[in-house]
Image (spheres, grey):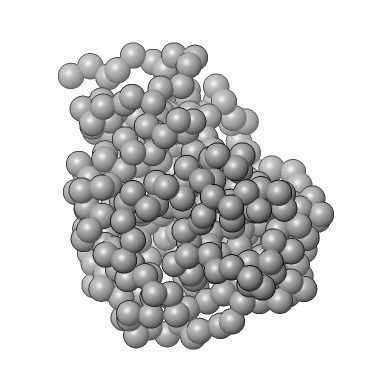
Amino acid sequence: MKLPQAIAPDLRHNWTLLEIETIYTSPLPDLIFRAQQAHRAHHPANQVQGCMLLSIKTGGCPEDCAYCPQSAHYKTNVEREALLSVDDALIAARQAKAQGATRFCMGAAWRDVPTGEPFERVLQMVRGVRELGLEACCTLGMLTREQAQALADAGLTAYNHNLDTSQEFYGEIISTRTYDERLQTLQHVRNSGVTVCCGGIIGMGESRRERYGLLRELSSLNPHPESVPVNMLVRVAGTPLANQDSEDPLELVRMIATARILMPASFVRLSAGRLSLSDEAQALCFLAGANSVFLGDKLLTTPNPEADQDQRLLDKLGMRLAAV
């Protein structure tokens, strides 16, 4: 079967499952070559954005996401921690900037964003991060229209709310929030003028077809998410997916390359699971179109490569972090 024709200047929002399958399963050299073409048409070829993700409220989440060590439904080694102070969050933001990050992300283990003082504190954090000259991103759970607008008014750059997987597989992973509720939060974010960060996870037991379904959902959003994090499952003891078989890194490469082709103007973020990847596998992810990484030794509560390890890899590849 022939690959669909090269990307037209206008971004598409009507990719079919068959087209996505054809792209995803094409010979890897062809897939990466096409992804490189799409990448270079929209982004600097050898530059990646550094992001830092801080857990500002940890553990005790009422959701039952099968991959998440912060769920109150599972017994894991994650200790509950109250919402950080504004000062502590901004200390971390300054450290992130010193390490080369240009985007500072704050995550709270909530199902819904609470009202009152906790939300006001988050708004102060957002204002403070922006005053440091950093992009500010939050992932706080479901938002109301009014909360999304308040975050926008505070200067929030982006809001992360992942779809995680396809609609068909979603019920195997989460029962405490519907897919439509996720889409509704994304619409509130979009309507507020804040950019959308939305991606998913591979390696949770889904089939390739279910990965195509996730890619179709993401690429059908109009406009496309400005940021598309692609995560590989980090298996954590105590969660239902703790004993899930490990995923082939080349599947991650294919997922990133296909996302790059479908959503060429978006940032595709190489996110969780990097500690399980060799330097060579990460290099292939960059070749496939990933142009952002998360810096720091933790992604919320799961481990991540040290900053000097990331810098050594980028140096070996002749790549660099985008300037602050």
| In the foreground, 143 or 200 | 143
Q: Quadrant of residue 276?
A: bottom left
Q: Quick check: 296 left or right of 96?
A: left
Taking the image as drawn, is residue 218 in sight?
A: yes
Q: Is residue 268 visible?
A: no
- Residue 3 location, x and y as percent? 27, 19
Asked whether, in this view, residue 272 is left or right of residue 56, the answer is: left
Q: Residue at x 55, y 22 (%)?
A: 41
* Quadrant where the image shows the N terminus: top left
Say if 82 sits above or below 108 in the image: below
Quadrant for residue 260, please give it. top left
For this rendering, which residue is in front, 18 or 272? 18
Residue found 30% across the figure and 75% down from its top: 239
Q: What x and y, as percent, mark residue 100?
A: 72, 54
> Compared to 118, does 267 lie above or below?
above
The residue under the point 69% across, 61% down is 123
Q: Residue at x 49, y 71 (%)?
A: 109
Q: How many marks?
A: 0
Above or below 139: residue 24: above
Q: Answer left or right for 181 relative to 140.
A: left
Residue 300, horizontal then vertical, whole percent:
52, 68
Q: Position of residue 290 (x, y in %)?
A: 49, 41
